[in-house]
Amino acid sequence: MDTRGSNAATKQRGFPEKFVYAAGRQVISVIRNVGKKKVFNLGGSLILLLLPSIVLSQVTAHHTVTVVVQTITLLQINVGTVALNITGAGLIAGQNQMTATDQSTTISWGTNSSLKKITVNTNLAAPIFAMKVLALNPTVGTAATEVTLSTVASDLIINIGRSSGTSSLQYTGVALASQGVGKDTHLITYTIQSQ
């Protein structure tokens, strides 16, 4: 390759020595001596060659996260045992019916399904005395009328779909003087089910 013209041009610009390497039409580097220091001038091609490595240093990664919500139904009673004692205190002479009430129990629930209700039943098939339950002021849904418990489930609170709420429970034991004395023990079951 004839570099005489190139050397002549270099001398005209004041460079005592110069080595020019060409790759096609792209200048890779020019080294010139200025005094005793060597100055390196980087041409556009070298910068372009370095650019992809800079871009590749910013690496990204991906993965998929899925949230799955299943049907959730929760029900809790806050009191384990309730005792309704009909002792005669506060009763009026001449009346056959005697009652005792308790409002210390709270029922709480949560469900993410629509069209649900809470039902109630007892396991005692042949009680001596009547036992009633009423939902008082439920925070969600509608309280049914007072239920006289039997082994067949009855509606206690309706329209509770996709909600969480609480309600006080009022138990009432009813005895007639003609029934004499005795004791009934109920295992009361509350159930959230489709309406």
Image (cartoon, grey):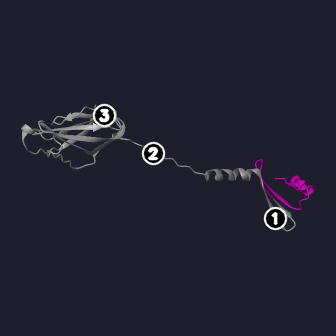
Coordinates of residue 102 in the picture (x, y in percent): 23, 44
Magenta stretch bounds: 1-30
Indicate which disc, 3 or 2, sits on the residue closer to the N terminus.
Answer: 2
> For the residues carrying marks 1 and 2, which lies nearer the camera in this image?
2
Q: Nearer the viewer, residue 46 or 101?
A: 101
Coordinates of residue 20 in the picture (x, y in percent): 81, 56
Indicate which disc, 1 or 2, sits on the residue closer to the N terminus.
Answer: 1
Q: Which residue type carries mark 3?
A: Lys
Q: Secondary structure at mark 3?
A: strand
Residue 75 seen in render: no
Residue drawn at the location 85% of the way across and 63% of the way down:
33
Q: Circle 2 is placed at which residue position? A: 65
Residue 116, disc: 3
Image-based side of 31 in relation to 56, left or right:
right
Specify few, some or many for label 3: CA neighbours under 10 Å numbering under 14, 14-19, or 20 or more. many
Q: Gap in Å between the C-alphas at discs 3 and 1?
A: 86 Å
Q: Nearer the viewer, residue 148 or 71?
A: 148
Q: Which residue type carries mark 2?
A: Val
Q: Nearer the viewer, residue 26 or 147?
A: 147
Residue 38, disc: 1
Coordinates of residue 26 in the picture (x, y in percent): 76, 49
Q: Gap in Å between the C-alphas at discs 3 and 2?
A: 31 Å
What is the quadrant of residue 34 in the picture?
Answer: bottom right
Q: Secondary structure at mark 1?
A: strand
Image-based side of 152 in relation to 31, left or right:
left
